[in-house]
Amino acid sequence: MSASQLGLGAALLVVCAASAQGDIAPSEVPHRNEPAPRTLFLEFKLGPYKPLIDREASLTGKPYETIFGTSSMLLFEIEVDRIFWQKFGTLAVGGSAGYAAKTGNALIAPGNPGEGTPSGDTTTLRVIPLRLMIVYRLDVAAIREGIPFVPYAKTGLVFEPWWSTKAGSVEDANGNRGRGAKWGYDIVGGIALMLDFLEPRLAKDFSNDVGISHSYLFAEYTYANVNNFGSKGLDLSSRHWMFGFSVDY
Amino acid sequence: MRARPFLALVLLAPGLCLAQATQTFPISILGGYSLNGVTRFGPANCGQVFVVQWGIPTPAQITQTCSIPEFWITAGICGDHPATGDVVLIPNTPLDLTSRSGVFNAVGVNDLPIFNTADGGGACGSYTANATLYVCGSVQIPSTSIGCGTNVFLHASNPPMQYRGLPPPGPTSFDVASLDSALKVNVSASLTDVAIIHVEMRQAGVGDFAEVATFSPAVGNAKISNLQNGTAYEVRAYDDDGVGNFSAYTDVITATPVASDGFYETYRRLGGEDTGGCGSALPGALGLPLVVGLYRLLRRKR
């Protein structure tokens, strides 16, 4: 048997196997390197968020640490990105909304017995970070070559409403209500692990049946300055990690 | 070969009987105070009445009855028929073999079997014990599918009811926490014996105690607001079983509301300059064109 005959036999075997698996005609077998068109990214993420409130220049103490200690808030965010360009990687515009809260004991007010010690009242700081951003994902190698790592970067505007309550009601300090919102910007860098390589067949079924092209686990670092671009007042800036799960459609 | 169907019948019949005999039909009690699924009565209910309803499951489940249903209230065990001293319930319309549901004439709490003074029982209100009674019902049904002849008793759900003549135990723990312009009262009490916890308060040494809060043992606490910081208040509590019996008062606790600073007040006191609000208009002016531009970009892509 010649080499050409062997080659022909192998080719026939491959075509037969492909046809038997999916009843797909050889001409319809999708090319491995053709990326499926995608339009949306959806991310769910959690991470420790500790606003840099105590670095405000005018402060003579550390209000965040005094009330809440050294631990962070737990921030939960959902992000949706609309892909508008996908050639060498993808470019998208995205929006996200999150929520975090931290509760501690209020302190007995000055001039009272036991002043400065924890009182029976609780006080809570809540924030809702809203982001509008541009996202670039370098997923060429993942889509075309199956290398499962996708580095990415994001940057955009942040708008962050906040409010502080004591015993369930928004605080009032000498006529100033303890609620407001801060503007800022953020820069995010991260890396995602494309999960398709774990179960390629399942991933393909997921894509065909549900329309989800890929799923990822990711970690990202956020550098956010949220202090009305350097104005005085509450500083909700942070440097924190977020971890999550995402899918693209 | 002929013995086989007979053998099968002999083997299956006890199971059939057992299946029917273990079934019950519902009775419900309307009146009194229901706690943890048990209807309770007490001194507060003396002179009042309550109503009993019953119903046999649909013909699909119980195809035939072979006797007129009987219903009664006992302080002992239910059995198949009322015993001496039990209170027989009188239907408001006569029952017959086709009756499958109904309501009885209202029963006076004073007429419960435990108040049979002829045998030494006390009258309602002066009865000083906690007693459990049952509302019983029974009817005969066929033990096989052949029909009436060999019957078994189908019993009602026989719901328990209580008459409580003893006071409930007092709170098992009681403390008061000082808050800003408020006090928080925490009380623990028996979940089975106590229906309501009452909290009374007065300014220390001034006037009479007045009730300021009530809650169930499952809730366990109440916040008393709009108090004066720096003023001492005396607080006490007692338990109520919901039917007119009350525990003794707890010891009096004196507590003083105290002003406190939350996060924002602490931030301001330490020199924080944020006075609330949504920041300057400049970022908003930057953000608006961005949102409009984004919207137009997405529309163009479609």
Image (cartoon, coloured by chain):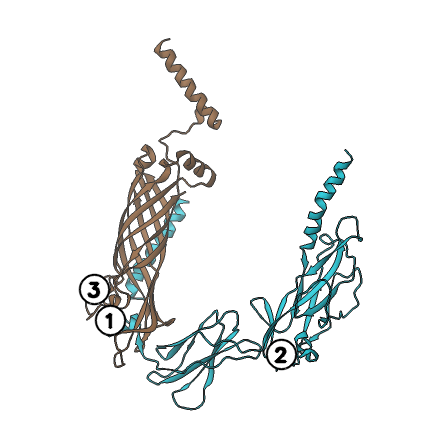
Q: Is B196 on the left-hand or right-hand side of B205?
A: right
Q: Mark 3 is on which residue type? A: Arg
Q: Quadrant of the C terminus of chain A?
A: top left
Given residues A186 and A105, the one toward you in this image is A105
Residue occupying the point 71% across, 44% down:
B12
Q: Is A25 on the left-hand or right-hand side of A196?
A: right
| SS type, badge 3 | helix
Q: Which residue is mark 1?
A: B273
**Mark 2 chain:** B
* Quarter location, residue B74: bottom right
Q: Residues within 10 Å of mark 2 (few under 14, many from 20)?
A: many
Residue occupying the point 26% across, 66% down:
A64
Seen in the picture, residue A44 relative to B175 is either above or below; the reply is: above
Seen in the picture, residue B157 relative to B258 is either above or below; the reply is: above
Q: Which residue is mark 2?
A: B45
| SS type, badge 2 | helix
Given residues B48 and A73, the one toward you in this image is B48
In this view, the mark in front (2 or 3): 2
Q: Is B264 on the left-hand or right-hand side of B226?
A: left
Q: Is residue A224 visible?
A: no
Given residues B206 and B67, the one toward you in this image is B67
In this view, the mark in front (3 or 1): 3
Task: Say if labels 1 and 2 share a chain.
Answer: yes
Q: Which mark is residue A55?
A: 3
Q: Colour of chain B?
A: cyan
Q: Colour of chain A?
A: brown
Q: Mark 1 is on which residue type? A: Glu
Q: Which mark is residue A137?
A: none
Expressed as whole percent of the image width and height from the top left, the position of residue B193 reads: 53, 72
**Mark 3 chain:** A
